[in-house]
């Protein structure tokens, strides 16, 4: 390791120590508080409590279904709205007078986390899952759009130059080159956002935005950790299922998208 690398590592370590001091991160306090977990584990793992809390499984499943619906609607609508914005925000498709204000607008949306958007929409439409759906839509627009326009900017310029040289319109360029080239990235981003939105919905319950998070927050307030464990176990199973399904879909779609892009390229070059 070179002296330059040692200096960089030393600076990083020093910054971590300074930041830890400023935020009062004390490992001793953490170690002293670990025994408190025994109270939680006792309520969760005692057989009698487990049997008693199993009666909340149907409620947890129904709440999880509501959460999945919220995340699905929010993700799909957010991606549909965000996709045109990603085209406008890409530097290799537009000049700075187009992409700069679009990026500024998207940065404003991303500035606020979904829970703050949920608080706003609870004020607008009241308590319930609709406020959560609106918050998920807005957050998805800001997040997916950034990922997508960054993916568009990494597209190989050769296919774009080849198609542009034959005089196609920008719409045709997007239709036959940009979308096929970035489709696999978009699918991955959609699946990631759906997974994220499902888990994020457990937090949106803090402000009364519906979903399984509403029950989790209520039980935490009354220190009913056994019931919380039932609901979070349902969330865990669903998230693992989404992860498994997303891997299968990515593997299947990427092969098809690559084949489709080869066909499209041949079509324009013939």
Image (cartoon, rainbow, N blue to C red):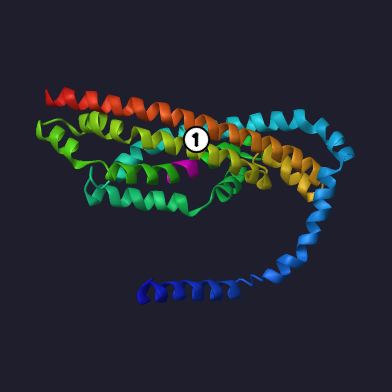
Q: Residue furthest front?
A: 1
Q: Residue at x 48, y 28 (%)?
A: 248
Looking at the rendering, the stretch of residues picked out in magenta corresponds to 138-142
Q: Nearer the viewer, residue 5 or 14?
A: 5
The residue carrying mark 1 is: 75
Under tag 1, what secondary structure? helix
Q: Residue furthest left?
A: 166
Q: Residue at x 48, y 33 (%)?
A: 247
- Residue 211 visible, this orientation: no
Q: Residue at x 21, y 48 (%)?
A: 95
Q: Position of residue 7 (x, y in %)?
A: 40, 76
**Residue 139 among those drawn in magenta:** yes
Q: Nearer the viewer, residue 248 or 150?
A: 248
Q: Residue at x 86, y 34 (%)?
A: 51
Instruction: Give the left or right position of residue 97, taking residue 248 as reference.
Output: left
Q: How many marks?
A: 1
């Amino acid at each position: 390791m070179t002296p330059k690398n040692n200096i960089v590592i030393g600076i990083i370590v020093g910054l971590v120590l300074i930041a830890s001091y400023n935020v009062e991160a004390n490992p001793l306090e953490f170690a002293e508080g670990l025994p408190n977990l025994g109270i939680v584990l006792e309520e969760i793992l005692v057989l009698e409590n487990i049997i008693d809390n199993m009666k909340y499984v149907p409620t947890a499943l129904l709440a999880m279904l509501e959460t999945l619906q919220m995340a699905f609607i929010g993700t799909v609508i957010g991606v549909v709205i965000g996709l045109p914005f990603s085209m406008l925000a890409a530097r290799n498709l537009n000049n700075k007078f187009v992409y700069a204000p679009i990026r500024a607008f998207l940065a404003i949306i991303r500035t606020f986390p979904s829970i703050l958007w949920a608080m706003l929409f609870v004020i607008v439409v009241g308590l319930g899952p609709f406020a959560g759906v609106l918050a998920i839509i807005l957050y998805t627009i800001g997040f997916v759009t950034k990922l997508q326009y960054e993916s568009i900017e990494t597209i190989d310029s050769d296919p774009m130059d080849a198609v542009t040289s034959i005089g196609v319109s920008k719409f045709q360029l997007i239709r036959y080159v940009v979308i096929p080239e970035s489709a696999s990235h978009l699918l991955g981003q959609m699946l990631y956002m759906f997974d994220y939105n499902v888990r994020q919905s457990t937090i949106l319950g803090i402000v009364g935005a519906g979903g399984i998070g509403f029950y989790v927050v209520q039980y935490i307030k009354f220190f009913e950790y056994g019931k919380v464990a039932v609901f979070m176990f349902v969330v865990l199973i669903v998230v693992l299922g989404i992860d498994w399904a997303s891997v299968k879909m990515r593997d299947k779609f990427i092969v098809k998208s690559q084949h489709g892009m080869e066909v499209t390229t041949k079509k324009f070059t013939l």
